[in-house]
Amino acid sequence: MKKILTAALTALVLATGAQAAGYPDKPVTNIVPFPPGGSTDMLARFMTQKMAEKLGQPVIVENKPGATGAIGATQVKRAAPDGYTLLTGSIGVWAVNPFLQKNLAYDPAKDFDLLTVAVRAPNILVTNPNVPAKSVGELVAYLKSKQGKVSFASSGAGSSDHLSIALFWQQTGTTGIHVPYKGGGPAISDLVAGHAEVSFQNLNAVIGHIKAGKLKALATTGDKRSALLPDVPTLAESGYKDAVVYSWQAIGAPKGLPEDVKAKVLDSMMSALKDPDVAKKLTDLGFEIVASSPKEFALFLQMELARWKTVIEVGHITLD
Amino acid sequence: MDILANLSLGFSTAFGLANLFYCFIGVVLGTLIGVLPGLGPVATIAMLLPITFNFEPVTALIMLAGIFYGAQYGGSTTAILVNLPGEASSVITALDGYAMARNGQAGKALATAAIGSFIAGTIATFLIALFAPPLAEMAMQFGPAEYFSLLVMGLIVSIILAHGSLLHAIGMILLGLLLGIIGTDVNSGAERFTFGAPWLADGIGFVVLAMGMYGVGEIVNNLEKKETRDVMLKHVSGLRLSWAEFKQILPSILRGTGIGSFLGILPGGGAVLSSFAAYAVEKKLSKNPIPFGEGAIEGVAGPESANNAGAQTSFIPMLTLGIPSNPTMAIMIGAMMIHSIQPGPAVLTEQPALFWGLIVSMWIGNFFLIVLNLPLIGMWVKLITAPYHLMYPVILVFCAIGVISINNTEWDVFMMAAFGLIGYIFGKLECEPAPMLLGFILGPMMEEYLRRALLMSSGDATVFFTRPLSATMLAFAAIALVVVLLPSISKKREETFKE
Amino acid sequence: MSSLIKHPKDFYAGLMYASVGAAAAWICRDYTMGSAVRMGPAYFPTLLAILLIMVGVASLIRSFFHRGEAIAAFAWKELGLVLGAIVLFGLLVRVAGLAIALILLVVISAWASQQFKLKTAVLLAVVTTAASILVFVKGLGLPFAILGTWFAR
C-alpha cells in the first residue's frame, strides 16, 4: 500500500514538474467575474484567439459573475498559481470593492500576481440638452443655483461612474441627487429622455447621441482630448486637475506564479493586445490599449487604491 | 412612397446569399438554445461575437438578431412539451400549452405557437418599418413614474391570471415580490436577505426558480400519480389546426400582437409584461368552453403572439435611438460598435442598408422559423410519447446542466432542488406558482422605479397622479381591480343566497 | 385541533405566508428604513412583509370557517430520490466531473419510478450522458470538466 502511495506521489511530483517545464500543456482558463456581454467579458473574449495562438493551447473564457466581481476574484485567488487560471477584472474588482464590500474575501494588492493593465477608457461628462450649461463652469454654477436638486445618473451604486460623480462633486464643491441604474443602458435612456440630467458615461456608448444633439458633452475625464470629439475640453482644462478618471481593465493570476510561466502568459497577452486586428476592435469599443508591465500595474494599483479610498471616505459612500 | 424604396433596399440586402445563410444559422441556433433551458441568448451572442468579426456588420447583426428571436421561439417548445419555461414569457405559455399537451394536443399547441409567432412577427416587422421613429419617441415619455404605474397595472391584471382563490393569488404575488428582492439593492447597493452568502448577492436566477417550481415540482407530481403515469400521453390527436380552429385563434393572435408590439418598445420591463397581459386579456374575452389553465387554445395563441411581437419591437429603441431595451440589445450595440458603427439616432440615416436589411431579415427569419418548426412538430410530439419513466430523468439532466451553466455555480443546482420541494408543497396547498413568478420578476423593478421616481421628484408622491400617462394607467388599474373583484363578490353573494 | 381547522390547505398556506412575512420583516430591521422621500433598503420589503402577514392571517382565519379537502399525502420516496439526485449532481459535478455526476443523476432519479429497472436506467444514463457531453461540452463549449478534480493529475 505504502509503495503504491509513494509511487503515486512520485508520479504526481514528476507530473507537476513536467507541467511547469511544458507550460501550457492544457487549456488556460480566463475567469471573467461578470456575466457574458459586458466590457470586461468582451475584452477577455477578444484577446482569446491571439493568446491561444501564442500559447499553443486553447484559452477558455469562464464567466463567474456575482457580487460585483467578488465571487470570481475570490475563486481565482484560491486557484493554484500555475498559470492555468487567470482573472480579467475591472477597476471595480481591483480598486473599488475593497472599500465598499464589507466581507471581501480577497485583497487585490496581496492575493494576486499583477500581470497587465490591458485597456482603459475615459468617461465623458454629458447632460440632457435642456440643461442650461454649455461648459463645466456653467454646470457648476447651475448645480450651485439648484442646491443639490439636479439628478446624476450612474450605472449602479459603487460603479466607477458613481465614483466619478462623487469625485466631481468633491472637486467642484457641488452636490446633487445620485440616481443609480442597473447598468449604463437604462441610465443613458433616461438621460436622453430628460428624466435624468447629468451623467458620466463611456464615450462610445454616447457618441451617437452627442452627434445627433440628443446629449450635450461638456468635458472628458481623460488627460487629453478625445480624437472623436476634439472640441470637447478635458476636465483638467476646465480647471479641475485632479478629476482625471479612467475606467480600466486589468489581468492578474493567483499569487506565486513561476517566473517562466509568468513570462509566457504575459507574452501571449502582449501579442494579443498589440495585434492590429484586436487593437482595432478594442479601440472601436472605446478602449485605449495600455498593455502595461507588471511593475507599472503594481504602481498604478497602489495609486488607484489610495485615490478611491479617499473619494469613498470623503463622499461617505456606503452600500446600505 | 418612401417606405417602398426603403423596403426594397431592405429586401435586396437581406436576400444577399451570405445574409440569408447567416439568418438561417442564427434562427436555428436560437431555436436550439431556446429549446435547451439555461443557456440564454445573451450568453450565446456574447460567445459568438468574436466569430462575427470578419462578417459584414449587417450580416453579423442579422445572425445575432436571429439567435435572439429564435430563442424566444424555441423557449415555448419546452414550456409546452414538458412544462419547462426557460424564460419569463414562457411561464404563461406553459400554463395552457402544457395542459393542452397533457390532453393529447401538444401538436396543436405547438402549431398555434408557431403560427401565432409568425403572424405576430410579420405584423411587428411592418410596424417597425412604418413607425419606428415615432414609436421610439413615445417610449421616451416613460419615466420612472410611468413605469411604476405600468407595473402596478401589470400586477393587478395578473390577479386575473389566477384561477384559484383570489386571496392566494395575492399572497403568492407578495411572496414573489419578496423573493425577487433577495440580492443587491439597485438603489443603495446594499445586500438584502442574502445572509452573507455571496451566491445570493445577485439574487435568485429566474431560470433556477422556474426550473425548480415547474420542472422538478411537476416531475414529482407526475411520479406520484401512479396509475395515470405513462399513459397520459398515449392518445395524441391532431397535429394540425383545422380552418375552424385557425379562425378561432386569429383574434387572439391579433390582440396579442397589438399588446406585445406596444409593450415590447418600452425598455424597462414592458416586454416581460406583454405575455402576462395578453393572457389576462384572452382570459377575459374568451368564449372557449375549456377553462383557462386546462388547455384553452387562446391561452397559447395570445401570449405567444405577444411575446414574439414584443421581441421584434424591442429592436426599435436600439435601432432608432441606440438605447438597449434588454441585455441582448446591449450586446447588439456592442456588436455595432466593434464594426465601427456608432449606435444612436443617426444609424437610420447613415446606415439605411443595415437598418432596413435587418428589419427585412427579421421577417425572413420568422419565415424560416415556421418552415423549420412546423415539420418538427411531429417529431416533438413523438418525443413526448416516449415512456415517462425514461423521459423524466432526461428532463432532469437538461434542468441540471441548464441551471449550472448560467452562473457556473453549483449553488444554483441546490437552489433548484429547494424550489422543487417548495413547488411540490405549494401544489399540495393549491398555491399557484404563476402569480409568484410574475411578482418575482416585477418586484425588483417596481421598487427600483418607485424609489427612483420619488428620488427624482424630491419625495413628491403626486408625480404618479400629475403625469398624465401615469395617472391614466393607475386609473385603468383601479378599474381593472374593480372588474376583478366584482364577479367574485357577486359570486359570493350568489353562494350565500344558495345556502 | 384538526376539527377546528376546516380548511387545512388554507390553514397551512396562511401559516406559510404569515411566517415568511414575519421573518422578512424581522430581517429588515437590520437594514436602513429611510423615509418615503429617500427610501432605504428596508422600506419596500417591510411594506410587502406586512401585507403578506395580513394575507396570511386572513387565510388562517378563513380556514376556521369554510370547509376544504384534506391535504393529499406526500410522495416522500419519489420526492427524496429526485431531489437527492439533483443535490448529488451539484456536489459531484466539479470533483467527480460531469460524466459521473450525470450518470448518477439519471440512475438515482430513475429509481423513483415504479417501472425502474437498473439495466434500462444504466443504459439510459450512459446514452444521455454521452449525448449531453457531445452537445453541451463539445458543441456549445460550456466549461465543464468531463472528469473532475478527483481525476486530475
Image (tube, coloured by chain):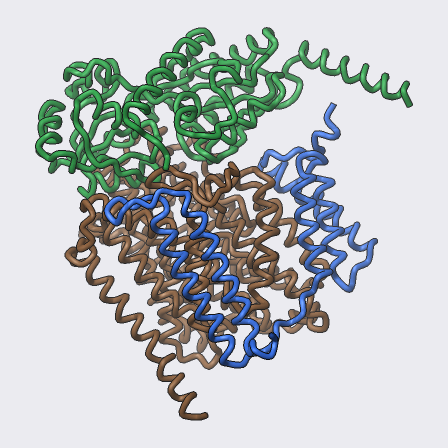
Residue placed most toward the observer, A63 or B338? A63
Q: Colour of chain A?
A: green
Residue placed most toward the observer, B162 or C69? C69
- In the image, residue B54 above or below residue B434: above
Q: Residue at x 43, y 21 (%)?
A: A94
Q: Residue A265: give x, y in percent of width and height.
A: 55, 13
Q: Residue B427: give x, y in percent of width and height.
A: 57, 66
Viewed as shown, does residue B464 lie left or right of A202?
left
Chain seen in blue: C
Viewed as shown, does residue A211 lie left or right of A245?
left
- In the image, residue A2 above or below residue B344: above
Q: Residue B463, can we see it? A: yes
Q: Residue B299, can we see it? A: no
Q: Residue A168: give x, y in percent of width and height.
A: 22, 24
Viewed as shown, does residue B477 lie left or right of A47?
left
Viewed as shown, does residue B288 lie left or right of A17?
left
Q: Which quadrant would the C terminus of chain B be assigned to in this image?
A: bottom left
Chain seen in brown: B
- In the image, residue B284 above or below residue A147: below
Residue placed most toward the observer, B277 or A46? B277
Name the quadrant containing residue A119.
Answer: top left
- Residue furthest toward the front? C1
Q: Residue at x 50, y 81 (%)?
A: C66
- Residue furthest toward the bottom? B498
Q: Residue at x 71, y 48 (%)?
A: C105
Q: Residue B333: give x, y in percent of width and height.
A: 34, 36
